[in-house]
Amino acid sequence: MRIRLNPSALANTRWPEYMSRFLIGGATTALAGVVAKEFGPSIGGLFLAFPAIFPASATLIEKHEKERKHEAHEHGTRRGRKAAALDSAGASMGALGLIIFAVLVWKLIGELSPWIAVLIATLSWLAVSILVWNTRYQVKSLCPPHGH
Amino acid sequence: MLEDILIRVVVGGLTVSLFAVLADMMTPKSFAGLFSAAPSIALATIGLTVAKEGRAYASIEARSMILGAIAFVVYAALVSRILLKGKSSALSVSGSALSVWCAAAFGLWLAFLR
């Protein structure tokens, strides 16, 4: 399966949708800070991995897939749900990388320059996420769901 | 405090939006989903936290973030499974499953960090 970057896909997203993601993301980030201030960093830290814009993103994916199918005069409800499910499966693999990110920041931020620690952690998140995704894809290719 | 909140809203909103735009452009969908679990909130706040509270404070937050991320794995896997098997909309499933993230994150916190 080829990974593609398709900038024209951005045309499907409308300004209110960009705005809602900006506001939800900003509000969650502020919430994490307020919770840490009120209840301490141990509780506040949990919210650094809060699935902030996940419901909004999943809804958009479902909606865009439905619209595409509707334009092709096909029933898109099921396809829309499946597209959102695939996105969620990808997110669960990305979240495995997020665990590595947090472990590295925890261990390295006291030892290295914070920026270097965060850079190493971010690159590791990306590498681990892609590795898990690729491994799962390879395993699925070897074991097709219907046993053919 | 208000200034701090406003900075977090703007920086957090921009970082989260950046990863969302990246995800929009990516195919296949399962690969794009990786960016739904990007460390966007952490990236937006770690710099501010280190500058205001110091590295030890940021380290404590990151240790708790490990548990939040484990809860995220559970949450996203559950949402994917329900969407594939069930008939509910993405919004209702992903929205109501946020309670599962909360239960998992706070349950792990009570078990390991309290």
Image (cartoon, coloured by chain):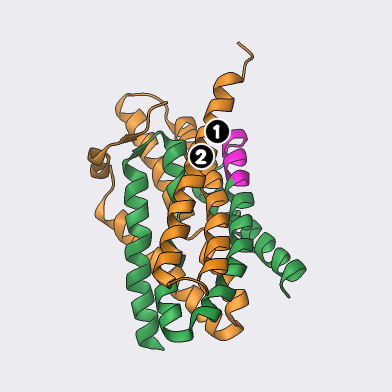
Chain colours: A orange, B green
Determine whether label 1 and label 2 are within 8 Å by CB.
Answer: yes
The answer to whether A49 is drawn above or below residue A135 in the figure is below
The answer to whether B92 is drawn above or below residue A119 in the figure is above
Q: Nearer the viewer, residue B96 or A1?
A: A1
Q: Residues within 10 Å of mark 1 (few under 14, many from 20)?
A: few
Q: Amino acid at mark 2?
A: Leu
Q: Which residues are magenta?
A: B77-87
Q: Residue A37: image x %, image y %? A: 53, 84
Q: Main secondary structure of the magenta part?
A: helix
In the picture of the structure, the residue carrying the numbered disc 2 is A131
Please state if A19 lies on the left or on the right of A95 as rendered.
Answer: left
Please state if B55 lies on the left or on the right of B43 as rendered.
Answer: right
Q: Nearer the viewer, residue A2 or A92?
A: A2
Quadrant containing the C terminus of chain A in the rendered view: top right
Q: Nearer the viewer, residue A21 or A3?
A: A3
- Residue found 47% across the figure and 37% down from its top: B30
Specify whether residue A85 is in view.
no
